[in-house]
Image: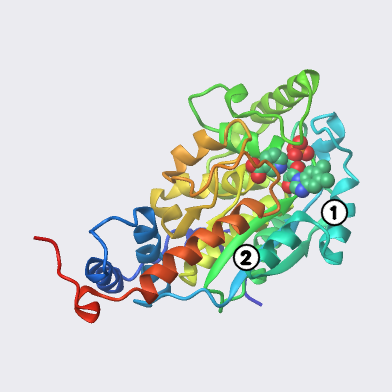
Amino acid sequence: MTGFATRAAFEAALADLPPPDAAIVAQARERQAQLTKPAGSLGRLEEIAIFMAGWQRRVRPRLETVQAIVFAGEHGVATRGVSAFPPEVTRQMVANFNAGGAAINALSRACGAALSVVDLTGDGPSGDITEAPAMDEAECLAALSAGANAVNTQADLLLVGEMGIGNTTPASAICAQGQAESAGAWIGRGTGIDAEGLNRKRQAVDAALRLHGPHCASPFETLRRLGGREIAAMAGAILTARQRRIPVLLDGFICCAAIAPLQCADPAFTDHCLAGHCSDEHAHGMLLDRLGLRPLLRLDMRLGEGTGAAVAVQIVRSALAAHNEMATFAEAAVSGAR
Ligand SMILES: Cc1cc2ncn([C@H]3O[C@H](COP(=O)(O)O)[C@@H](O)[C@H]3O)c2cc1C
Ligand SMILES: O=C(O)c1cccnc1
């Protein structure tokens, strides 16, 4: 059993993040310079290929094993009218994931990813963050470990997504924690809540920050108090991927919010991550800026589940196809630049 047995184990992992392989990065960059195209003409595809090479430690990186994980958890705060949908939809969607009928099932199949469904609803809803911590210490460690243990250590690329009715509320609270902007700036419509619902959401985030804000001195405490089971699990999975040097394609607002506290602890935390897309959720663009990430896609999606990441896999495939399969100037006997 791997995972995070203690808070200290989690903090030690966060304090010891491996970098990409600099020698392989240099070789992949050199290969890009020799391919039959003007330098830089494949734009960000070139950078994506070099990124993948450095983390996989292969000059010619591959995408044979792509793992998508969708983590599901219920939220106490979901009973406060902060979502357009009722809390039972989370469990119903888990059944849908297991039956293969959700958007992430279709899009995983389309991009060649193997989907793992990690159902944390059996542990009950996380605490209502407006009046209690989302989790106690043992629950938070269990959620972080569920994330860690779900990662296929052989994966060439990991996609992380979530399902949890109400979870844009804790995600906004995590983002707002310790930031200069007012909490309202981090709130959005989630599943499509109306103006009154948005107001309830703002009040819930304000109440959570009043209660927990002064105690959120570490990433662990922020996730434990303001997060939820699937949110902590995503953080655990993305941290474990880093320890194994597995590159990660991030999904939407909630997925990115899960790692915001980790990136506060170490600005290099997101170095192994690509932002699959910028979702339509109001604060996602602002959050990506903070994480130092430029999204690959902007398709006005706002679903979660890992769907934006799954669509972006096609971009990574294109980047690697060009990088791995193109001829060099020497191979093709094409003259270089004057
Ligand atoms: C049928 C259905 C499928 C979903 N799949 C993802 N979400 C998304 O919506 C939820 C977050 O929005 P809020 O905070 O407004 O509840 C999360 O479950 C997220 O994954 C869904 C929502 C619904 C209704
Ligand atoms: O950005 C997302 O992933 C998102 C936005 C709204 C609802 N669920 C997910």
Q: Is mark 1 within 8 Å of ligand 1?
A: yes
32 versus 207 height, above or below: below
The answer to which quarter of the image holds residue 240 is: bottom right
Which residue is label 2 attached to? 111
Q: Is residue 305 left or right of residue 317?
A: right
29 versus 181 height, above or below: below
Residue closest to the eye, 197 or 306: 306
The N terminus lies in quadrant: bottom right
Mark 2 crowd level (few <14, some 14–19, many ≥20, 10 Å Cα):
some
Residue type at mark 2?
Cys
* Residue 325 drawn at (x, y percent): 38, 76
Residue type at mark 1?
Met
* Residue 142 drawn at (x, y percent): 71, 62
The C terminus lies in quadrant: bottom left
Q: Is residue 247 left or right of residue 43?
A: right
In the rendered structure, are the residues bearing label 2 and label 1 in contact, judged by CB atoms less than 8 Å apart?
no
130 versus 147 height, above or below: above
Q: Which mark is residue 93?
A: 1
Q: Is residue 327 left or right of residue 309?
A: left
Number of on-image labels: 2
Rounded to the nearest whole Å, what is the CA distance between mark 2 and mark 1? 21 Å
Q: Which mark is residue 217?
A: none
Residue 223 makes an appearance in the image:
yes
Q: Looking at this rendering, what residue extends furthest in the left direction?
A: 338
Question: Which of the four quarters of the rendered structure image does ligand 1 lie in?
Answer: top right
* Residue 297 drawn at (x, y percent): 52, 47
Label 1 secondary element: helix
Residue 75 makes an appearance in the image:
no
Label 2 secondary element: helix
Residue closest to the eye, 136 or 126: 126
Dot 2 or dot 1, earlier in sequence:
1
* Residue 153 drawn at (x, y percent): 57, 76
